[in-house]
Amino acid sequence: MQTKYKRKINSKDLSQNRYKNTDHLHIHPYDPELLETVRNDLLKPRTCRELMDWVDSHPHYDVIAEASSQYIRGTHQDDCFWQVAQIDTDWHNINRIITEYAEEHELDKNFKTDYIDEWRVYDMEKQKNYSPFRHNSELDNQHKHGFDKHYQLIEVTLTDRFPEIKAIEKVFEFEWAKTDINYQPTSGAFPRHVDFLSTLIKRAIEHDPKIANAQYDPITKGPVGWQMKRIIMPAESWYPGQMFSFEEHIWSNWEPGQAIDFSWQHCRHATANSGYNARPLIKVQGLIRDDHWLAKKEYRKFTI
Amino acid sequence: MKYIELKTSLLSHIKDLKPNDFYLLEGKLIFKSKGTADTVRNYLQGKSYNVVQTPVRNWEHWQGKYESILYFKDLQKESNEQ
């Protein structure tokens, strides 16, 4: 099954190009006036489908992403990332399963984040490597600055390989739940960025006209009436040298099962593995309504 | 607090402040004029915000010139932040 969003490498709408001089592409810090123009453009009313089409075909995803952040420096750490749950389960076994998968697929040895088509949703078997899909202009930007090894993304939801992790996904009671393992081998570094949760919302748009036609909120960066959540939790204890930053705040010394919610919309976050052990992180995302326990910022403990 | 809320509030409370007097750059407010930045800094300090003011490194690839940057330190925790 092909998805609408399994697009070609060169499907960019160059009519949206705002650069008078392309020599200025991917040069940081971005021009403040250009960012303001794009930021105001983002505030225009659009449905979710219109917004995703606009983002997907825009020649400068990296500028859109940067402009989409409304983060104010000085924001309290608890408003950047916060623990929402503790999952008690056999993390030793889960970590063993992930390590075996990594060895079987040589994820540490063949580690390079390159230009590939979307692969995670339906077309697993034909993929030649395990790099996550990125917008071409985002990759251009990252590669230009030397970031060519980010992390390896391992599919969970759409395979039968990880039933133990699917059980974890269920406790969050998400609609359109989508789980991956973000496995960062040593030497991986993913530069600071904000998210659109594109894989999640594109999947919902494709299969649910209500979400496709819902108004897109450029501040919550999701369909009006919904919240999009991305929960991250380590599968193994923190090793010295492993880094995770949210703007000026640092998350460190983590333990398996700490479920962390964060302001993926606005807080620039970055990861690096300068330790000597791979860093497996489970990433569960999905849509919720305002009456969901996560929306109400309730803390929960689960034993699986 | 999001930039759009802050900007709307500053524009409604500070006389003669215009939308194009300042922008957002990596979480900081960047001003074309130091005088305007001074005015905004004084306003925010009057509201008991901890505000830092610094000069600007102007980059060749920018279209405009800027004179001053303001950013907050230690903002209070909000509730139900997205």
Image: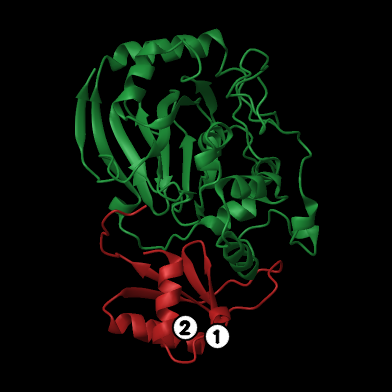
Chain colours: A green, B red
Query: In the rendered structure, the residue with mark 2 lies on which chain?
Result: B
- Residue shown at the point (64%, 43%) measured from the top left: A142
A209 or B59, nearer to the observer: A209
Mark 1 → mark 2, Cα distance in angstroms? 6 Å
Residue A7 in the image, given as x and y percentages of width and height = 72, 33
Instruction: Please name the amino acid that badge 1 sits on.
Output: Ser
A285 or A150, nearer to the observer: A285
Q: How many residues crowd around disc 2 within 10 Å: few (fewer than 14), some, or many (20 or more)?
A: many
* Residue A140 higher or lower than A125, as above or below: below
Q: Secondary structure at mark 2?
A: helix
Q: Secondary structure at mark 1?
A: loop
- Residue shown at the point (34%, 42%) measured from the top left: A289
Q: How many marks?
A: 2
Do dots 1 and 2 share one subunit? yes
Q: Work out which quarter of the rendered image holds the C terminus of chain A and state it.
A: top left
B66 or A72, nearer to the observer: A72
* Residue A199 higher or lower than A160, as above or below: below
- Residue shown at the point (48%, 43%) measured from the top left: A270
Residue marked by disc 1? B33
Q: How many residues crowd around disc 1 within 10 Å: few (fewer than 14), some, or many (20 or more)?
A: some
State if disc 2 and disc 1 touch (CB < 8 Å): yes
Q: Quadrant of the rendered structure where residue A22 is?
A: bottom right
Query: In the rendered structure, the residue with mark 1 lies on which chain?
Result: B
Would residue A106 appear left or right of A288 to someone viewing this image?
right
Instruction: Please name the amino acid that badge 2 sits on.
Output: Ala
Residue marked by disc 2? B37
Residue A268 in the image, given as x and y percentages of width and height = 47, 50
Q: Quadrant of the rendered structure where residue B70 is?
A: bottom left
Residue A12 in the image, given as x and y percentages of width and height = 76, 45
Can residue A153 be seen from the camera position used here? Answer: yes
Q: Work out which quarter of the rendered image holds the N terminus of chain A and state it.
A: top right
Can residue A236 be seen from the camera position used here? Answer: no
